[in-house]
């Protein structure tokens, strides 16, 4: 073999090794040729981007935390025999020299987006025996490389934000072969800080940055660092009235730039503005039909002041806050106005950012009513990214059609792990299950929504797991999908608390997500909206007690694990596991014990009073637990970060009613108990089927799994069948289906499938889907849509077949409801 082809083969072999945080390329055991981290100083170039120096400082501190000895850090000549050299191609003479001489194989790194190589190089420079080189394709590529090394040594991305302490290691060795990371699956990936009134803002104002008295540069710097640790690059900043606008202090944007973070703004805030704080002329004047000059000047000001930074520009227009656009008249008029607005906004971008406007990242987020305007035929320039929203509860409303998938600007997703709005907010414990995030974002990926993913994380805590999942997926979608929800929970537990306890902790997290998917702790109320009549749940005491028993078993497991958590990990344990799991369990006790009082007080007053006392105790325990979070955890670091939902009297129509306990001497129910539903049902879990053309989703739906129809990329290949052999007691049974409240993917307005029994003709079943209607509200609070099929069968052995019509429909269960006597 000729030497050149041998070399080419070697290079190919080297670059076949693409790696991720979970790969064992770093070990605490020595191996031949491995590079020992101990004793190596960190070198970077003073000519590199500022974020490289910031990341290098973090690496020094992280290695210090892991090994007990911080390495030295320098921009000068090497001081020792080994070094960790970090730098960006074109910005670090040592790295550029090694690449030029072929001693560092950079392959196609130059010009790649956010990519990096980690390689060991012998004799890289006079005086240096060996170096571990982290070379980035661009400024964030280098920073991500540095944080990748940190994470591989055992430093969690949440080391500061959730007090996760790394395990101490005496020595660390990096495998000698080179590894190539990136580019990320999704180009722009980030978070939206929202509804910060009850956590992040009061905490920042009172505890973390009292001198500033608000979320300001000090807090944002911590957010930027977190984003880089999570390999994210984009932020939509806090925008509620309680917080001063991000750009009110120019230090914020300057700091974002230092950290290499790309700034955007929410769906309601075009052109990096914050309307609630910055628009002074009154809501009526925020009208492009009536006041185009005033509004355009307002946008112009920001394009002028911030155009020099890396931004993603939100285009279009809504009302001042989360409301419809003022002006334009009917939907046709609104569409015409929006098209004019987009043209004019792009004019500003061309003028102040780059005349080649199509090269500047811009997004159009079709959120709430804007999706209707878009669907009516709005023309969005091809280079603008179309950002599809979920319904605020984790179900993506629409994804691109084949035609939209061909647009050069591509698509993205705006997703929620937290939400303030109708029918009921979910602001407290962040319980959107990992399996739903993986399923929904996986579909988005399959249908080419890969340009920008932004997730609403509320006020960050306690949305850590969901946030990390969303961003890990945005970095490497295939890896996370291959893990699935349970694999991911296991990995999170291992990375955060160590391998020894990972299995047990992952099981706790899985059961927590399962139970709270069936009803969120913020949705323990079965009525919503202004003018609706308060009523109790439709659960009998026995049904509710079965749910409470599952929570009790979960809390018992939590107690067993809690006892094993070492002192150094207790804060992280409390913040990431103990508080959310325990608080959700207590919220259920508070609610269902009080309801048991209502249902029992007439007939069994003694028992009813015991239940009332339990409800009061659960309420007091939630308060005590939350006080502990705010006052004791991490020595008082999180004072003000956590409020129990509903936190105060604001936005009442969107929020669960404050809990009122039955008084000790009460003799009447607080609420007249509603009739009990769903008794005597025969429920068959969808995943017990045999058949083909469907995919099992573990961790999603009641019973632990559900079945998804077909492949969303192949709409024509529907028709897969699920077969069930069911034995029903005597009598007549109406067949109903429990579907996940997802949305049709193919422009349909309903989820469609078909059922047949005993080999008979298939009967079409459809669940109409419309955000805002009663079925939708019920679907997102119940975590399911229960729909009739029109099919009734007599008891005995029955064969039931469920056939897919549209791909993507997810079936959770088959439900047989008693329907009287059998009339064959
Ligand atoms: O979740 C959203 O995107 C919106 O609901 C927010 O923009 C809005 O601020 C909401 O929290 C309150 O109205």
Image (spheres, helix red, strand yellow):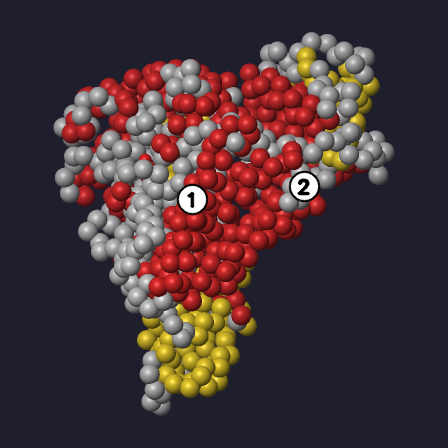
Q: Residue at x 62, y 29 (%)?
A: 147
Residue situated in front as seen by the camera: 25 or 525: 525
Determine the image quadrant of residue 781: bottom left
Q: Residue at x 83, y 31 (%)?
A: 33
Decide if ligand 1 comes within 8 Å of the CB at mark 2.
no
Report which residue position mark 1 lands on.
620
Image quarter in which the C terminus is found: bottom left
Whether residue 641 is situated above or below residue 252 in the rendered picture: below
Where is residue 489? Give x, y as percent. Answer: 58, 48
Pick the front one: 656 or 120: 656
Q: Residue at x 46, y 44 (%)?
A: 621
Label ID, residue 498: 2
* Tag in front: 2 or 1: 1
Q: Check disc 1: other Cα within 10 Å, few if <14, some if 14-19, many if 20+.
A: some
- Ligand 1 positioned in quadrant: top left
Task: Give the residue displayed 36% in from the left and 67% down from the top.
Answer: 604
Counting from the top left corner in percent of width and height, residue 278 is at: 27, 22
Circles 2 and 1, Cβ within 8 Å, touching? The answer is no
Q: Is residue 349 visible?
A: no
Looking at the rendered structure, the secondary structure element under dot 1 is helix
Q: Is residue 65 above or below residue 494?
A: above
Q: Picture quarter containing residue 811?
A: bottom left
Left or right: where 351 falls relative to 61: left
Q: Is residue 646 above or below residue 738?
A: above
Report whether 78 appears left or right of 355.
right
**Quarter occupied by residue 793:** bottom left
Answer few, some or many: residues within 10 Å of disc 2's Cα (few below 14, many 20 plus, some between 14 and 19): some
Spot occupied by residue 431 in the image (x, y as percentages of width and height): 46, 47
């Amino acid at each position: 073999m000729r030497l050149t082809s041998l070399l080419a083969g070697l290079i190919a072999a080297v670059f076949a090794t693409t790696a991720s945080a979970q790969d064992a390329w770093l070990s605490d055991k020595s191996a031949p040729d491995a590079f020992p981290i101990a004793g190596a100083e960190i070198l970077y170039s003073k000519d590199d981007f500022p974020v490289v120096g910031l990341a290098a400082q973090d690496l020094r501190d992280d290695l210090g935390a892991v090994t007990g000895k911080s390495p030295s850090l320098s921009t000068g000549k090497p001081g020792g025999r080994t070094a960790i050299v970090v730098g960006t191609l074109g910005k670090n003479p040592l790295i550029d020299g090694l690449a030029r001489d072929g001693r560092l194989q950079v392959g196609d790194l130059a010009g790649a987006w956010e990519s990096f190589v980690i390689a060991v190089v012998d004799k890289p420079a006079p005086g240096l025996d060996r170096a571990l080189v982290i070379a980035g394709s661009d400024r964030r590529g280098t920073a991500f490389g540095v944080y990748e090394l940190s994470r591989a040594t055992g430093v969690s991305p949440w080391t500061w934000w959730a007090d996760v302490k790394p395990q101490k290691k005496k020595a660390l060795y990096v495998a000698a072969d080179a590894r190539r990371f990136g580019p990320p699956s999704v180009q722009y990936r980030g978070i939206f800080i929202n509804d910060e009134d009850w956590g992040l803002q009061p905490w920042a104002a009172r505890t973390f940055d009292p001198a500033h008295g608000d979320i300001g540069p000090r807090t944002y710097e911590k957010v930027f660092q977190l984003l880089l640790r999570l390999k994210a690059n984009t932020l939509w900043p806090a925008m509620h009235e309680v917080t001063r606008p991000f750009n009110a202090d120019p230090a914020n944007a300057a700091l974002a730039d230092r950290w290499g973070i790309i700034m955007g703004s929410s769906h309601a805030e075009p052109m990096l503005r914050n309307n609630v704080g910055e628009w002074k002329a009154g809501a009526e004047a925020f009208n492009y039909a009536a006041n185009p000059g005033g509004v355009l000047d307002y946008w112009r000001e920001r394009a002028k002041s911030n155009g020099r930074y890396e931004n993603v520009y939100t285009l279009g227009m809504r009302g001042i806050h989360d409301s419809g656009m003022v002006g334009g008249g009917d939907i046709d008029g609104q569409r015409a106005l929006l098209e004019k607005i987009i043209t004019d906004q792009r004019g500003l971008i061309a003028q102040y950012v780059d005349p080649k406007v199509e090269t500047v990242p811009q997004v159009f987020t079709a959120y709430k009513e804007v999706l209707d305007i878009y669907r009516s035929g709005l023309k969005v320039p091809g280079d603008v990214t179309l950002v599809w929203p979920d319904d605020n509860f984790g179900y993506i409303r629409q994804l691109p059609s084949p035609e939209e998938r061909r647009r050069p600007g591509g698509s993205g997703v705006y997703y929620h792990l937290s939400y303030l709005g109708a029918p009921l907010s979910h602001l407290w414990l962040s319980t959107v299950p990992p399996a739903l995030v993986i399923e929904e974002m996986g579909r988005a990926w399959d249908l080419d929504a890969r340009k920008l993913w932004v997730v609403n994380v509320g006020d960050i805590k306690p949305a850590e797991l969901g946030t990390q999942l969303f961003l890990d997926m945005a970095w490497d979608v295939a890896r996370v999908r291959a893990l699935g929800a349970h694999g991911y929970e296991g990995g999170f537990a291992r990375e955060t608390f160590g391998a020894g306890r990972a299995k047990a902790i992952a099981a706790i997290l899985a059961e927590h997500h399962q139970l709270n998917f069936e009803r969120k702790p913020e949705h323990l109320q079965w009525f919503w909206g202004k003018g609706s009549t308060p009523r109790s749940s439709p659960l009998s005491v026995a049904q509710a007690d079965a749910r409470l028993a599952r929570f009790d078993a979960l809390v018992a497991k939590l107690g067993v694990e809690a006892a094993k958590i070492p002192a150094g990990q207790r804060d992280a344990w409390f913040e990431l596991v103990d508080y959310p799991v325990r608080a959700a369990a207590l919220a259920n006790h508070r609610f269902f014990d009080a309801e048991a009082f209502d249902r029992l007080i007439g007939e069994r007053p003694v028992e009813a009073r015991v239940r009332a006392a339990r409800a009061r105790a659960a309420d007091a325990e939630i308060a005590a637990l939350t006080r502990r979070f705010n006052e004791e955890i991490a020595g008082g670091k999180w004072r003000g970060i956590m409020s129990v939902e509903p936190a105060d009297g604001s936005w009442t129509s969107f929020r669960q009613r404050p809990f009122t306990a039955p008084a000790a001497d009460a003799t009447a129910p607080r609420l007249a108990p509603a009739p009990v539903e769903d008794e005597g049902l025969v429920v068959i879990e969808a995943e017990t089927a045999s058949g083909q053309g469907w995919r099992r989703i573990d961790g999603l739906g009641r019973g632990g799994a559900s079945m998804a129809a077909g492949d969303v990329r192949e709409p024509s290949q529907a028709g897969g069948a699920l077969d069930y052999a069911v034995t029903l007691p005597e009598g007549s049974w109406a067949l109903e289906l429990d579907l996940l409240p997802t949305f049709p993917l193919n422009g349909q307005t309903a989820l469609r499938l078909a059922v047949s029994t005993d080999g008979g003709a298939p009967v079409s079943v459809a669940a109409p889907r419309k955000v805002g209607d009663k079925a939708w509200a019920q679907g997102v609070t119940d975590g399911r849509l229960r729909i009739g099929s029109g099919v009734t069968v007599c008891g005995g052995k029955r064969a039931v077949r469920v056939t897919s019509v549209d791909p993507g429909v997810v079936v959770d269960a088959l439900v047989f409801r008693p329907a009287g006597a059998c009339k064959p």
